[in-house]
Amino acid sequence: MPPKKRTRSSKSTAESGINDASKTTGSRRKAAGSVKNGNKDTADTAPEYSHWLMKSEPESRFENGIDVKFGIEDLKALPDQTGCWDGVRNYQARNFMRQMKEGHLAFFYHSNCKEPGVAGLMKVDPFDPYQDLFFFSLPHCITTSFKICTKGGPLKNLALFTRARLSVQPLTKEEFDYIQSLEDKEPFE
């Protein structure tokens, strides 16, 4: 059997033979509890998003024998142009979807294709208890480019460029409005 570990104690208590471990443990727990309360307060001040960018692949790609292709044209073919956004496996993207509320707006983004860009605009359906998304399309695709990001403009912190692998990404109101304003302009070359 291994020898028992010695407990640490202050010099004065070691001389007197009194174990001070219970006093120090209690104060540490109290300090740790106050830190937890501090974190709880900061969690309440986390930003709440109301604009989103949701990525989908419009070109055929097979995963486990299933074609995962889904573009704006596939959505238009569905009844009432309404569909359930599924197939999200990333936990952060899933948690972003849970934050969505009725009436939130999101861009339908075509990724992993020849011309990636915003292909449509969608809104969380206020009449569906499962929060399926109601979609409507923009007249043309708004292409996005790394040129916008490198200029230090309003899209410099856009999750599309900083966290490119996420299929569901939050947008600030400024980012959303700026991307929407690009609809009236010529595509980037």
Image (tube, rainbow, N blue to C red):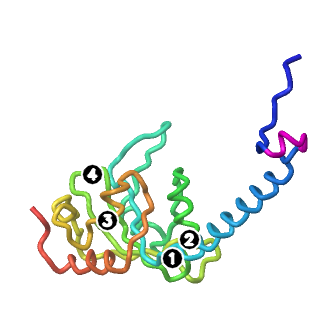
Q: Nearer the viewer, mark 4 or mark 1?
A: 1
Secondary structure of the residue carrying tag 4 is loop
The image quadrant of residue 142 is bottom left
Q: Amino acid at mark 2?
A: Gln
Of the residues under marks 4 and 1, which one precedes in the sequence? 1
Mark 1 Cα-neighbour bin, 10 Å: few <14, some 14–19, many ≥20: few
Task: Kindly give the residue lying farthest to the left in the view shown.
Answer: 189
Secondary structure of the residue carrying tag 2 is helix
The residue that disc 3 covers is 157
Residues under labels 4 and 3: Cα distance? Answer: 23 Å
What range of the chain is rendered magenta?
12-18
Q: In the rendering, at what x and y percent does residue 14 appear? A: 83, 40
The image's mark for residue 48 is: 1
The answer to whether mark 1 and mark 3 are in CB contact below 8 A is no
The answer to whether mark 3 and mark 2 are in CB contact below 8 A is no
The residue that disc 2 covers is 99
Report the number of discs.
Answer: 4
The image quadrant of residue 187 is bottom left
Q: Quadrant of the N terminus?
A: top right
Q: Horizontally, is 111 left or right of 44 in the view?
A: left
The answer to whether mark 4 and mark 3 are in CB contact below 8 A is no
Q: Amino acid at mark 1?
A: Glu
Secondary structure of the residue carrying tag 1 is loop
**What is the chief secondary structure element of the magenta stretch?**
helix
The image's mark for residue 113 is: 4
Q: Amino acid at mark 4?
A: Cys
**Of 128 and 153, which appears nearest the observer?**
153
Residues under labels 2 and 4: Cα distance? Answer: 28 Å
Residues under labels 4 and 1: Cα distance? Answer: 31 Å
